[in-house]
Structures are given as structure tokens and as C-alpha cells.
């Protein structure tokens, strides 16, 4: 008996196959992402049978519905790889597809050039060329002047008084080629599927963040009463000019809501909290309110509005921490019991990550009554959006259903497309990537634990590859929960280096307040600071570090200021996918560059090229040779350039191979503006 035959369903393929259209996220089910002005290369594999010429057109539909056709370029004929760069100029939903097509003029050019010069089928080839151009003039709408160019070429091809080569030249004229490149004659046009590109505002890709606990900014301690007085939105606003002066774009606030008293945590995450201890701001909710309320110690709504307005006046946006969890005192426990998990003994389950227990936090349950849970969170988000907050740092989004985030971000985006979401998800790659795919514009990363040159290169190449179209990285050297051994024991060199690499490897980076002071003492047995600010007030006495103060000069604030100045001065650092890694003889030395073509309003254009050389070993000074990919920098291998070191202001000539000396005895990193001699 013969085996039963089955019919396998097949997707249709065009007469001219178009395959592997990119960027493509989840087989086109989700949009690729870009920001206004960002370079996006649309690529596809386009081919055909035989030897006739094939070509490809990018069909681009803007958010307003206008359509543009752009001829693509085959960058590798052997692999049939076609490319068209775009730089979307407006926000919104764009669509793109690629049309493959047979190119009669291209086929004729190839065949006629060979045959006429060899005097093979000369008259036939010249007449076929004339007929192709006649078709092009008849079948494609074009201006009169352009039609005249083709008519002249047809006449020249049939001019019996001219030599065959002169007649051929008429059909190959630059004006003819340019016209048919702009308005080609296309046969067997075969479109690909259409994909989406979501174009967002620039801050969704590039920005410098500064994190604060508002209650610490302006907090004071009474040594007589042994009591703290909380900072407020008004006192925290007094810190904003210094943050803005360092060049930060976003000031990020840890939770500002009422804090529960049940199971309140004391200093260093202990359970024996005193009445005067503030508790963790992540234990949200008390009789004073929940996620839609302000902690009374911080002030009222007028004070919050003042803080947001003051940040805007200084050129910054406010980002809020959204932690979807509740203290046992949260109003939701009574008004929305369906938001929680009730155990068999009738108690509500608190958060656990065995063996860790978080008795002061009830996690939300989105499965008991999804409609109610979704609606309540959406209502809360609108409260803050209406107060002028358009950026949200989401705490532990990987502990909530992905489908919930997809719904929430899409629902908010319909009315507020400028809202930006940052995922604080230090978790498995599949979850991190999927959160990006369903809408989070940015994500925390493993940067804090990637410390060697090899690890950093491998990680950034992954982030800047296909993943860059849906998950934009945010690099943080430390956070209020993370203080790695590298930072604990690396000294000043480590704190400079990690800030510099975060600020130059990727477009968005952030620091936790106190980074300037290199707060490096860890709680025993934990990778976090001793006396963690999450559980107590911290008065850093900023005035002591100002000129004339007792600790003047003991701060990295000038260094951070210079990093942010460099970022603003060099647009190449505001992109992710434009990174190139170079080679160093010492495997502890990381070398990379970023290059971007900048077009000014006047029409003048120039290449902005920044080259970074970093010694990732903070404990020793290293001397090594670096070997540069000169083509990636915009030079021929034999050329040299002026290396303008942007931290120190020094300049020197550099070539393909150069010696560097970097480490704690000098500077751990060079940030170099690559300049031509002329």
C-alpha cells in the first residue's frame, strides 16, 4: 500500500519573489520601532529565474496616508540583498512593503552593451532598445521634459547615419538612466506583505535619566529629637537646577504614594521598624490613599504640579515609578478584593521569591477579574497623565501578565501616543524581549553585570541587532537595588568608566542619585548599598560638595556634566544600530565607534564620528595597541585623522594602528571626536 499523500498549505509567492523583508518583528504580527529622524534600513531578498534584470521598490505609506515609491539598491548581487534607507520625519504608524519587478530596460542595457560592442545582433539589439524606451514613454506617466528625453534616445537608437556605438550611447545616456531610475518601466510587479513601523518621539530612544527619592531631597535630621523630617516636592524642586545643570533629560521619582504601616520595613530591610521609620515606598497604600494619591509628607497636588512644572521649565521631563502592588493597608484590599490572591486560610498572599519574603507587599492578581483589574489600573494611569507625566518606569513588569501590558500600553497610546514606558525587568531574555514587543519603549538590561570588554561587545552587538527594532536598552551602572562588586571595589576608575560606557554604548542611560559621590559600601551579603535609601531617609548634604564646601572636588558631577555635554554635541551617540567595534591587542580594552550623517537645516551635511577606547580593568593601567576599521570611520586605510579627546580637550594625530595608555593613573576611557585634517 502506498503512503497517503498530504497537501501542505503554502503561502503564495510572487512572479518575482520577495523574501526576508526586514525589519520584521514576530513575522509581522508586531510593529518594528523607530523614532523621528532615526535611520532605518528596509531590506529584502529579491530575485528571479534566469538572467534577466530584476529590481526592487520600497513602497512607504506615511501616517497621513500619502504613499512614496523609492528605488532600492542591491548591495550584494550574489545574495540578492536589496536595501532602502529611510529616516521617518513624523511620529505615527508607518507601513512598508517591497515590490519586486522585472526590469526590461536593465535587461536590455546588460545584453546590448555586450552584443553591440561585439557586433552580435547589433540592429536587433538597437531596435529592441528603442521599443523598450517607447513602452516606457507610453506606459508610465511622466513630465513632458522627461518624455522628451526618452524620445530623443529612441531617435538616436534608430539613427542609421550614426555608428552602432553612437546609437547605443543614445540609449545608455545618463539622462535616460536617471529618468528610468526615477520612473521605471516595471513588469511582473510582485508585492511583499505589508509591515508596520511605529515611529515615536526621540526620548523613546535617547535620553539621560537621573533617579531620586523625593523624600530624601531636603530631608533633615533633628539630633536633639532624634527624628527625621521628610523632604517634600517643594524641597526636591530645589535640587532640580543642579540635575538640569548636569545635562539630564529625565528626573525619575521612586513611588510617591502613601506607605502602609502593616509589616513596615525598617532600615536595611529589617522587620523591626520604628514608628518614625518611613518604610519602603514600594509598599504602596494606607488610609491616606493608594496609587492615585500622594504621600502627605511630600505635599499636596499643588506641590506636585509645581515640581512637574519646574522640571519642564528646566528642560526636563518627570518619570514616575509604577509599582503594581499594594501594602496590606491599601484601600484596594477593601474596595477591590478581587485584585488579590486569597489563600486557603483566608489570608491574602504576600509577595515571595523563596527564600525571600516581602510581608509588606501584596502582589496583584490579574486573573480573578481581569476586566476590573485592567479598568482600575487604567484609571490610575490617567490620573498621572492628566498631571503632566508622560514617562513611566514600571517596577517588575515581568511579574504581571504580558497580555495586560499589551492592552494597557495600547489603550493609553490611542489617546496619548507620546507616553513612554520603561520596563524594570531583570529577568529571563524571553520575557524581556516580549515586553518590548508588546509596547515597552525601553528596558533595563544586564549592563550592570557585563564588565569585561568581550562581554560588553557581545551584549551590545545583540542589543543593536534585530532586537533593536523592538527592545531599546537603558544602561544603569547602579540602581537603588544594585551595587555590584565591580562598583564596590573598582574605585574612581570604575565609577568614571561605567558612566562613560553607559552614556556612549547606547542612547539611553541613567544614574541613581549619589552616583556622583561614588557611594560604594554594600550591605553585608547583598549587592546593594548599606543603609539602603529604600528604607530610610538620606541627607547627602549637597552643599558640602559645592565650590568652597568642605568636600569640594570629591564629586563626579563635573564628569557626568561633561558626558551629557558630549552626548548633546554628538548626534551619533543618540543612535543604537550605528555602532562598530574595533580591535585591541589587550583583551581588557574595548574599542568602538559611532558614525552618523548629520544634515543641517541649511542643507549642509557632515559625518559625526565618535570613537571610544576604554580599559575595562579599573585596577591597573594598561598600555596596548588598537587597530581601527578606517572605512567604518570614513577614511581610507592609509589616511590619518585628528583625535580630539573630548574629556580632557587634548588632540593628537591617529592612524589605523595606535598606542593607548589607560587606567586609574590617567583616565580609564578616551571619548574621541574623529576629525579630518582639512
Image: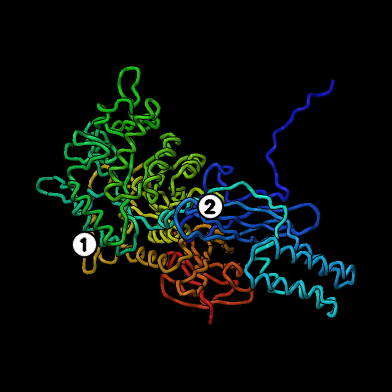
Q: CA distance from mark 1 to mark 2?
A: 39 Å
Asked whether the viewer can see residue 79, the reply is no
Residue at 49% over, 74% down: 603
Of residues 437 and 157, the one drawn nearer to the viewer in this rendering: 157
In the image, taking residue 31 as reference, residue 286 lies left or right, namely left
Q: Residue furthest left?
A: 224
Figure quadrant of residue 328: top left
In the image, taking residue 625 as reference, residue 385 lies left or right, namely left
1 or 2: tag closer to the N-terminus: 2
Q: Residue furthest right?
A: 120
- Any mark on residue 543, and which? 1
Q: SS of the residue at dot 2?
A: helix
Figure quadrant of residue 340: top left
Residue to which mark 2 is pinned: 455
Q: Quadrant of the N terminus?
A: top right
Q: Position of residue 557 (x, y in %)?
A: 32, 63
Q: Is residue 641 above or below residue 224?
A: below
Q: Position of residue 357 (x, y in %)?
A: 34, 31
Q: SS of the residue at dot 1?
A: helix
Amino acid at each position: 500500500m502506498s503512503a497517503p499523500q498530504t497537501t501542505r498549505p503554502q503561502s503564495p509567492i510572487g512572479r518575482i519573489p520577495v523574501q526576508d523583508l526586514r525589519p520584521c518583528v514576530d513575522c509581522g504580527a508586531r510593529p518594528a520601532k523607530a523614532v523621528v529622524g532615526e535611520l532605518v534600513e528596509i531590506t529584502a531578498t529579491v530575485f528571479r529565474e534566469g538572467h534577466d534584470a530584476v529590481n526592487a521598490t520600497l513602497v512607504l505609506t506615511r501616517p497621513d496616508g500619502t504613499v512614496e515609491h523609492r528605488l532600492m539598491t542591491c548591495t550584494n548581487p550574489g545574495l540578492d540583498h536589496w536595501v532602502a534607507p529611510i529616516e521617518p520625519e513624523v511620529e505615527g504608524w508607518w507601513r512598508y512593503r517591497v515590490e519586486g519587478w522585472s526590469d526590461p530596460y536593465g535587461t536590455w542595457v546588460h545584453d546590448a552593451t555586450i552584443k553591440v560592442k561585439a557586433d552580435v545582433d547589433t540592429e536587433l539589439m538597437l531596435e529592441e532598445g528603442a521599443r523598450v524606451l517607447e513602452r516606457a514613454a507610453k506606459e508610465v506617466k511622466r513630465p513632458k521634459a522627461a518624455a522628451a528625453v526618452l524620445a530623443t534616445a529612441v531617435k538616436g537608437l534608430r539613427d542609421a547615419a550614426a555608428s552602432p556605438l553612437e546609437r547605443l550611447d543614445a540609449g545608455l545616456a545618463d539622462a535616460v538612466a536617471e529618468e528610468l531610475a526615477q520612473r521605471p518601466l516595471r513588469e511582473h510587479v510582485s508585492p511583499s506583505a505589508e509591515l508596520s513601523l511605529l515611529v515615536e518621539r526621540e526620548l523613546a530612544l535617547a535620553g539621560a535619566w537621573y533617579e531620586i527619592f523625593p523624600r530624601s531631597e531636603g530631608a533633615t535630621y533633628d539630633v536633639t529629637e532624634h527624628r527625621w523630617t521628610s523632604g517634600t516636592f517643594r524641597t526636591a524642586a530645589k535640587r532640580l537646577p543642579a540635575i538640569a545643570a548636569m545635562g539630564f533629560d529625565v528626573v525619575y521619582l521612586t513611588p510617591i504614594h502613601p506607605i502602609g504601616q502593616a509589616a513596615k520595613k525598617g532600615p536595611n530591610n529589617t522587620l523591626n521598624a520604628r514608628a518614625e521609620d518611613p518604610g519602603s515606598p514600594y509598599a504602596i497604600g494606607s488610609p491616606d490613599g493608594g496609587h492615585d494619591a500622594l504621600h502627605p509628607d511630600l505635599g499636596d497636588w499643588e506641590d506636585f504640579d509645581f515640581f512637574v512644572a519646574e522640571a519642564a521649565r528646566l528642560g526636563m521631563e518627570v518619570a514616575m515609578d509604577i509599582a503594581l502592588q499594594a501594602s496590606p493597608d491599601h484601600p484596594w484590599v477593601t474596595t477591590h478584593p478581587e485584585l488579590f490572591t486569597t489563600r486557603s486560610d483566608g489570608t491574602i498572599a504576600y509577595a515571595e521569591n523563596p527564600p525571600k519574603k516581602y510581608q509588606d507587599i501584596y502582589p496583584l492578581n490579574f486573573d480573578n477579574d481581569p476586566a476590573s483589574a485592567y479598568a482600575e489600573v487604567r484609571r490610575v494611569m490617567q490620573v498621572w497623565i492628566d498631571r503632566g507625566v508622560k514617562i513611566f518606569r514600571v517596577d517588575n513588569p515581568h511579574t504581571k501578565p504580558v497580555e495586560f501590558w499589551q492592552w494597557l500600553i495600547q489603550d493609553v497610546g490611542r489617546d496619548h501616543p507620546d507616553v513612554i514606558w520603561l520596563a524594570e525587568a531583570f529577568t529571563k531574555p524571553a520575557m524581556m524581549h516580549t515586553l518590548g514587543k508588546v509596547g515597552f519603549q525601553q528596558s533595563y538590561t544586564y549592563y550592570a553585570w557585563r564588565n569585561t570588554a568581550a562581554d560588553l561587545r557581545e551584549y551590545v552587538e545583540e542589543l543593536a541587532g534585530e532586537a533593536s527594532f523592538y527592545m531599546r536598552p537603558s544602561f544603569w551602572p547602579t540602581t537603588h537595588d544594585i551595587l555590584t562588586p565591580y562598583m564596590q571595589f573598582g574605585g574612581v576608575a570604575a565609577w568614571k568608566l561605567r558612566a562613560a560606557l553607559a552614556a556612549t554604548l547606547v542612547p539611553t542611560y541613567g544614574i541613581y542619585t549619589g552616583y556622583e559621590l561614588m557611594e560604594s559600601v554594600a550591605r553585608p551579603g547583598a549587592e546593594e548599598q548599606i543603609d539602603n535609601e529604600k528604607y530610610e531617609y538620606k541627607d547627602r548634604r549637597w552643599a558640602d560638595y559645592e565650590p568652597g564646601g568642605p568636600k569640594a572636588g570629591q564629586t563626579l558631577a563635573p564628569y557626568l556634566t561633561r558626558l551629557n555635554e558630549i552626548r548633546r554635541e554628538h548626534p551619533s551617540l543618540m543612535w543604537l544600530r550605528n555602532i562598530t567595534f574595533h580591535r585591541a591587542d589587550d583583551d581588557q580594552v574595548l574599542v568602538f565607534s559611532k558614525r552618523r550623517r548629520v544634515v543641517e537645516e541649511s542643507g549642509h551635511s557632515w559625518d559625526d564620528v565618535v570613537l571610544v577606547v576604554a580599559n575595562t580593568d579599573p585596577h591597573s593601567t594598561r598600555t596596548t595597541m588598537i587597530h581601527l576599521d578606517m572605512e567604518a570611520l570614513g577614511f581610507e586605510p592609509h589616511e590619518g585623522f585628528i583625535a580630539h579627546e573630548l574629556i580632557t580637550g587634548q588632540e593628537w594625530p591617529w592612524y589605523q594602528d595606535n598606542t593607548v595608555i589607560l587606567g586609574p593613573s590617567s583616565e580609564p576611557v578616551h571619548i574621541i571626536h574623529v576629525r579630518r585634517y582639512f
